[in-house]
Image (tube, grey):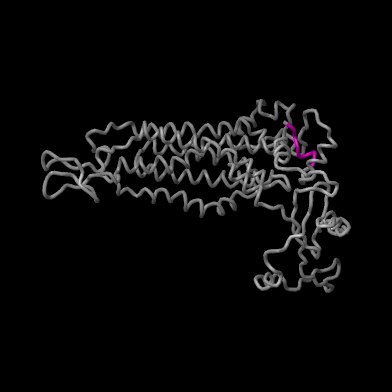
């Protein structure tokens, strides 16, 4: 998370691209573009806007290269005039102007907002806490991804041997996440975000039940299929929902803060390690020093060998066989293979339950005085929200409530520098 913050703060720029010849810009943008920017330039060529400098930025791709790459876009366009089908006007070539926002010192000599001030502004916005609540609530379901890398491979290899297609089973999720998101996005286009997120969370959270019921390679494959189906439903929608809440001018820092769940990554690794140690233990007595099973029998004597070296395992007669799995190892104490997957499913189910509990707050339609953001409300729609149903008794156009003692004018002047208004902010 700290690395993400450093990248966002040091390398991500807030760039604004304006086409001064675009006839489709709204009136507000046209008035902004028609402003005489030259009167705002200081001695160093900066453009001052309150406490923010706007620096003319150079395009990475020259206009003539764009015309070569996209010739049809730059062809002359004819716009039909109203009530005159024959009259047309040629559209001018785009005239792009790019500006970069820089937070430095203003012309008045006052210090502009730094990282600490920007974090304070973000943490006083309800949108920030909405994405943080979702992020930390989805911590347990994210353990499915970690278990697919840390538990499933040793589980299959220790119980079914080295010839099991572990990485083929793992690739189900990879290829599913490459192919399915555009298809699912097209099919679910137009639906409210959480009406898609909630079913996806339930599908992904309950997917380990297939391995718990059938602790085999086939059960793991079915688990990966349903895990992928649930993931492609909720994960892209959650990312687009987070992006829609990002305040203008603070997008990079907002995404860095929203990824605060990653601080719990080491805890997930520790839990996965303990589960492997207690419920999916290894059998080093039946392996060579490279980790291969001593599954082959030497032709010269009754000694077991691996693909690389001889092992310190000797058979008493030819009727015995060398261990090809941990279950064949005489000193191995096997645990119930379904236990770890039942525990994983129970932990994963905590995510959709928590998201459902905070769902009215996450949707942002209610204020604090309305049953504490709707969290404590009790009605039929609230119950059906467990499957993503939309509440009908809320005003979607209601504005967030500001609470706390704050000077509205001074705080509005602080937040509007980042493209947010006082109506978009709720103090916590």
Left or right of 87 on screen, residue 276: left
In the image, what residue occupies the spot 32% across and 37% down?
282
Residue nearest the viewer, comparing 130 with 7? 7
Q: How many marks?
A: 0
Q: Is residue 344 above or below residue 71?
A: above
- Residue 154 coordinates in the image, percent (x, y): 36, 41
In the image, what residue occupies the spot 80% across and 69% down?
79
In the image, what residue occupies the spot 72% across and 55% down?
15
- Residue 360 coordinates in the image, percent (x, y): 66, 33
Using the rendered view, name the quadrant where residue 424 is placed.
Answer: top right
Whether residue 423 appears in magenta in the rendering, the answer is yes
Q: Is residue 163 above or below residue 122?
A: below
Q: Quadrant of the N terminus?
A: top right
- Residue 408 coordinates in the image, percent (x, y): 83, 34
Residue nearest the viewer, comparing 192 with 12? 12
Residue nearest the viewer, comparing 38 with 150? 38
Q: Quadrant of the C terminus?
A: top right
Left or right of 359 on screen, residue 213: left
Whether residue 35 appears in magenta in the rendering, the answer is no
Q: Is residue 129 above or below residue 105?
A: above
Per the rendered image, the range of residues in magenta is 421-427
């Amino acid at each position: 998370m700290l690395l993400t913050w450093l990248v966002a703060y040091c390398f991500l720029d807030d760039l604004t691209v304006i086409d001064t010849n675009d006839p489709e810009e709204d009136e507000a943008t046209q008035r902004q573009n028609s402003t005489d920017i030259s009167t705002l330039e200081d001695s160093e060529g900066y453009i001052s806007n309150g406490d923010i400098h706007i620096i003319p930025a150079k395009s990475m791709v020259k206009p003539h290269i764009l015309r070569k790459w996209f010739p049809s876009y730059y062809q002359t366009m004819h716009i039909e005039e109203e009530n005159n089908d024959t009259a047309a006007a040629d559209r001018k070539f785009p005239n792009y102007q790019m500006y970069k926002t820089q937070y430095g010192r203003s012309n008045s000599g006052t210090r502009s907002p730094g990282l600490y001030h920007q974090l304070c502004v973000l943490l006083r916005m309800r949108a920030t806490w909405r994405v943080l609540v979702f992020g930390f609530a989805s911590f347990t379901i994210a353990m499915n991804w970690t278990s697919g890398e840390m538990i499933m491979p040793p589980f299959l290899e220790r119980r079914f041997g080295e010839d099991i297609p572990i990485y083929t089973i793992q690739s189900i999720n990879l290829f599913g996440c490459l192919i399915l998101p555009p298809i699912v996005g097209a099919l679910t286009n137009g639906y409210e975000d959480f009406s898609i997120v909630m079913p996806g969370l339930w599908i992904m959270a309950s997917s380990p039940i297939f391995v718990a019921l059938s602790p085999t390679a086939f059960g793991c494959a079915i688990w990966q299929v349903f895990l992928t189906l649930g993931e492609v439903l909720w994960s892209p929608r959650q990312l687009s929902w987070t992006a829609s809440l990002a305040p203008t001018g603070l997008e990079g820092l907002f995404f860095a803060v929203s990824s605060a769940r990653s601080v719990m990554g080491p805890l997930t690794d520790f839990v996965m390690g303990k589960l492997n140690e207690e419920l999916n233990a290894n059998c080093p007595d039946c392996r060579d020093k490279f980790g291969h099973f001593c599954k082959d029998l030497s032709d010269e004597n009754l000694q077991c060998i691996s693909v690389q070296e001889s092992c310190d395992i000797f058979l008493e007669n030819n009727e015995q066989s060398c261990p090809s799995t941990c279950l064949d190892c005489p000193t191995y104490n096997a645990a119930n293979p379904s236990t770890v997957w039942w525990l994983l499913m129970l932990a994963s189910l905590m995510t959709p339950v928590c998201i459902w509990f905070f769902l009215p707050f996450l949707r942002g339609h209610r204020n604090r005085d309305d049953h504490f953001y709707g969290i404590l409300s009790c009605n039929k729609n609230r119950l059906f929200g467990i499957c993503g149903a939309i509440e009908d008794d809320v005003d979607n156009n209601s504005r967030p409530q500001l609470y706390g003692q704050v000077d509205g004018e001074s705080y509005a002047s602080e937040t509007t520098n980042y493209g947010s208004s006082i109506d978009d902010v709720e103090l916590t």
